[in-house]
Image (cartoon, helix red, strand yellow):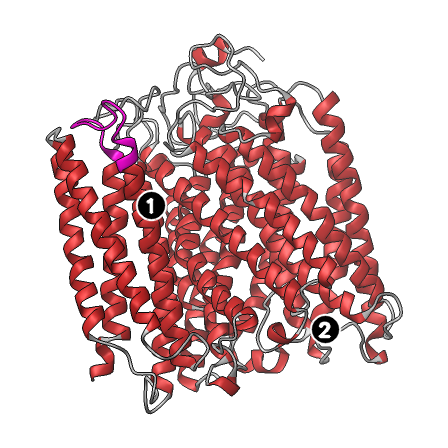
Amino acid sequence: MQTTLDSHTPSVAHPDGHQDLRVVGLLTFLASEFLMFCGFFAVFLVFRSAVAQWPPEDTEVELLLPAINTVILVASSWVINLGTRAIKKNDLAGLRLWFGVTVAMGAVFLVGQVYEYMNLGYGLTTNLFSNCFYLMTGFHGLHVFIGLLLILGVLWRSRRPNHYSDLTHTGPEMAEVYWHFVDVVWIVLFALVYLLTLI
Amino acid sequence: MTSADLPLSAPVAPSSHGHPDRWKWYDYFTFNVDHKVIGIQYLVSAFIFYLVGGFMAVLMRTELATPDSDFINPNLYNAFLTNHGTIMIFLWIIPAAIGGFGNYLIPLMIGARDMAFPKLNALAFWLIPPAGALLVASFFFGGAQAGWTSYPPLSEITANTAQTLWILVILLLGTSSILGSVNFLVTIWKMRVPSLGWGQLPLFCWAMVATAALALFSTPVLAAGMILLLFDINFGTSFYKPEGGGDVVVYQHLFWFYSHPAVYLMILPIFGIMSEIIPVHARKPIFGYKAIAYSSMTICLVGLFVWVHHMFTSGTAPWMRIFFTISTLIVAVPTGIKIFSWVATLWGGKIRFTTAMLFAVGLLSMFVFGGLSGVTLGASAFDMHVHDTYYVVGHFHYVLFGGSVFGVYAAVYHWFPKITGRLLNERLGQVHFVLTFIGTILTFTPMHQLGMQGMPRRVAMYDPQFTGLNQLVTLGAYILAVSVIPFYINIIWSWIKGPVAGPNPWNALTLEWTTASPPIIENWEVLPVVTRPPYDYGQAPAEPAANQESLLSNPH
């Protein structure tokens, strides 16, 4: 039985005093969001299984840059975790430092993605593979961008005195959860779109 | 951010929580975070869209009164066909049953002061008006004409601008549905009053858990399919274009992965409503509480694995047809459990034939008929014969009109006194019921025969041999159109002048009846304490409200 009247975690944002459920809500939402990506993944695999050569000639994928990008994005998930750990110890400077580093890493990822697009030599409409490639990576890139905005939002709010502390840190936690989600989606996407071409 | 904090738009009056004691009429037109306001917003919007969608149906049936295309332009007919389906599903049943009653009743039934995320809740509702506006706008570009299923290649080559707007409508409404579902799940999971265990949870809430889970899992897949369609139409990709290596059947999979579960989205909340109304008006404890609760969850789970039965004629492999025939027929088991449980609840009860009960019993008979024709359609061999004929139209209208719409009507008659504090007129309600019942049978039964004879669906013209039955169907449709008149008069008149209902006019035991009608803004002064099962009717002691103290402190 859940106790709903007494909040376990003290929270200034809840005068009515029910538990802060925002992280639970975000996780529920992301479960749903993940299924949208699953839809794209399924479509990609169906198309892949239907032809002899996938990707077709002249639309091969670049591997080195995306691999570096993958390392950066996965590493940034640890970095952002350092930030939320810091605020749980009431270390605001630590939060701002690590969140700032995460923003930088995310931005490098996006720039790398755009650079990759510009040097591939084929576009969205070239063939069915490039349709899938740009749609899936682009859609993921959009989520990275939204994640960056969330983290920047946390950084912006951290300028207010006492906005985040060891007791109130739901905002940074939610940004972290979302960032991990973006990371997990990328790992699956990288495996499907890039690594599968090696087989 | 999204918490039970203060509505910014509401005028602040001196009160313990910083909101006025009662909402004013204009509060219902604002970004209000009170779940009851949002519930009413959903319901009123849905009932407006119901008239729009119904008007399109009447125009189509008028066209179909004669074999030739002599009343409206066939392209306009196609646009009505498409948007009738879209409106009735996405802007009528889903907002009314899930958004409306879900939002209004869940916090009241579980003893919460509001939903878990009130602002998110308001946001989910306010995605609906822009979606409705876009749908209206699409008519200025000819209207989407590819049917509510919008299969490519037809959807990629007809009325591109209107089709694009239609896709945006679906994406907006899908987002609204997902956000609402997050709220329902977290609210029921985490916000129950401490004395309310899962075993005492009203069955409507159980049904909403199943509904919300299903919406969360299936809606995003539809969004994926719609985004690919959007790219195909506007950005030159070829996901669904065979000439570019794409595959039209992929769309059908993505579409039906949502749209079959969508029929459960439209009926599971109605099953929940049935499980509330029948024991109250039969004055008996519900038969098989656990069986009904778990069968909702079973329908949710099995319902995710039946979608290919819409695609038996799409070149589907035989092994898939066998698998999906079996899984489809399995859905009849949990559904049958519910039906038998309701019949067993009625058995030997002291039945009060209130209008709510009339519609509930009417639903029972209609749904059994629609369910049986569903079983026939689930069988691959038979489906091959009647696929894309009026048999299918007859079947799904039996379950959606005879099921979902009857259920929404029953719910309105049952909870209107709680929502407005006033009783509906029973005599007008009976007229409404009789007209609806006769109209439904006349409209949708002959469709089965037309389908068996081979009349294709979705066409403005037909072979003259089908004229007689079609005129019968059109007559039925007109009766249905007339049937809503006493209903809307009843609603509007009773809302203004109806007799005062009091907190608990039906002597019901679930928690929403322990507060005033309409409930005060945060539902209770003192939260109720659950002391007995939710359907303990006809047992001694007679009918004490679960929290009389709070009743006395909130005079109407």
**Which stretch appears magenta?**
A155-170
Badge 1: chain ID: A
Image position of B303 with respect to B107: above or below: below
Q: Circle 1 is placed at which residue position?
A: A149
Q: Mark 2 lies on which chain?
A: B
Task: Decide whether the magenta segment is chiefly helix, strand or loop.
Answer: loop
Closer to viewer: mark 1 or mark 2: 1
Residue B89: image location, x then y, percent: 60, 55
The x and y percentages for residue B174 are 50, 53
Front-most of residues B317 and B375 = B317
User: From the viewer's perspective, is residue B430 above or below residue B263?
Assistant: above
Quadrant position of residue B79: bottom right
Q: What residue type is labelled 2?
A: Gln
For label 2, the SS is helix
Which x, y percent locates residue B533? 38, 31
- In the depicted structure, whether residue B128 falls above or below residue A169: below
Identified by mark 1, the residue type is Leu
Rendered residue at 67%/25% (across/down): B423
Give how far across and how far down residue B291 sits, in percent.
38, 49
Q: Residue B286 carries which label?
A: none
The residues tagged by marks 1 and 2 sit, at their Cα atoms, a distance apart of 58 Å
Residue under numbered circle 2: B449
